[in-house]
Image (cartoon, rainbow, N blue to C red):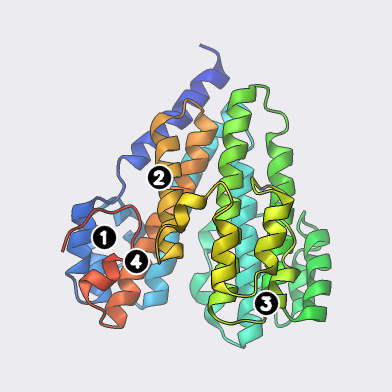
Amino acid sequence: MKMPDFALNSVYAKVKALYGKRLTDKNYTDLLKLNSINEIAEYLRTKTAYSEIFEGLSSTEELQRSRLETLLFNKMYNDMLSVIRFQKAAGSKLYEYFIMKYDVEQIIKVLSSLETKSDNYFFTFPVFYNEHSHLDLCALALAKNDMQLLECTKHTVYYPALRDALTKYRLTGSLAALQTDLRDFLDKQFISLTSGKKKIDEKSEIINLYKCINDINFVSTLYRIKRFDVDYRLSQLMANPIMTAFTKKEITAMQQASTVQELDSCFKSTYMKQVCNTPDIHRALDEYLYRKLTLTVRRSSSADAVMFAYFHFTELEIRNIIHIIEGKRYSLPEKEISDLLCGTNMSF
């Protein structure tokens, strides 16, 4: 067997093994019965695959919510790093997309902290990730304004996109508009990373999965704008996705909808129309994506597609845990918290 084939098989096997350690319905049921952040942390430490993120921490250490959330995302980073060496050996560079994606998230977190004049970024600062990041994360954390933030990216691939995005941000004051510009940057990087794939079926599978993820994020953002009665013109600042399965006509109609009801009507004419048959569109979108990712991990014969789906799947799992943490923080009933979780089959 040639080395690239062996390495791709190793990627496939590694991701399958990681997926096999996902949280079960029993885990979620147990977590919902706990009463504090430390109890949740101790359960994750002793009963799940998240145990690795607590190495070096005392079991009696009092954890803040933000600290635990940082550790949860460290699990995702650790999983990614464990797969990278096999992808490198196989000659695949698709893992680079996730490095750039997480870098962009750090840039947005810093800018958001500057906008709200908070110091929360230090609590979400993944220091160990510095080895693989294209950014100087220490310098990023010390940025005091958007010009210093831009300077931190000067010798990186992010600089031109961030420079242009910040120009629009200063004119509009819209962080959402900046985020869509950086999303378009990531779209272009994804296109570049997959352009060399020779297997048409495999390339098509990954691209279609990417478009689906993009479309769900796009629609979720539009619904938040309409639901919270934000000036509907904000949606006009959101550039049309480069990578999308929606038609240009569908996107324009959804952007121009001035109410949730109008958006519902537009959304029902798209390929995701089955998602509309529920009053909780955000939960339905998450469930739709969860099923899509799960099917890919379980049935795809493409190592890259399985890897790509798994890391997005992990993001959903971490979001579930954060919903539980937040629910406990505000003393919500178990049933109400469980309704926020996707991909579970718990009964109450």
Kindly report which numbered mark, 1 or 3, lies closer to the viewer in this rendering.
3
Q: Is residue 272 visible?
A: yes
How far apart are labels 3 and 4 at the CA level?
Answer: 26 Å
Q: How far across and down, in percent of the image, does residue 128 sit?
A: 51, 58
Relative side of 112 to 127, left or right: right
Tag 4 near tag 2, CB within 8 Å? no
How far apart are labels 3 and 2 at the CA level?
Answer: 31 Å
Residue flagged by tag 3: what amino acid is it?
Answer: Tyr
* Camera-side residue of 63 and 73: 73
Relative side of 5 to 254, left or right: left
Residue bearing the label numbered 1: 44
* Camera-side residue of 236 and 169: 236
Q: How far across and down, in percent of the image, does residue 166 sit?
A: 79, 72
Residue bearing the label numbered 2: 291
Residue flagged by tag 1: what amino acid is it?
Answer: Leu
The quadrant of the image that shows the C terminus is bottom left
- SS of the residue under disc 1: helix
- SS of the residue under disc 4: loop
Mark 4 residue crowding within 10 angstroms, few (<14) / some (14–19) / many (20+): some
Residue bearing the label numbered 3: 232
Mark 3 residue crowding within 10 angstroms, few (<14) / some (14–19) / many (20+): some
How far apart are labels 1 and 2 at the CA level?
Answer: 24 Å
Kindly report which numbered mark, 3 or 4, lies closer to the viewer in this rendering.
3
- SS of the residue under disc 2: helix
Which residue lies at the image location 41% right of the left edge and 49% below the top edge?
Answer: 290
How far apart are labels 1 and 3 at the CA level?
Answer: 41 Å
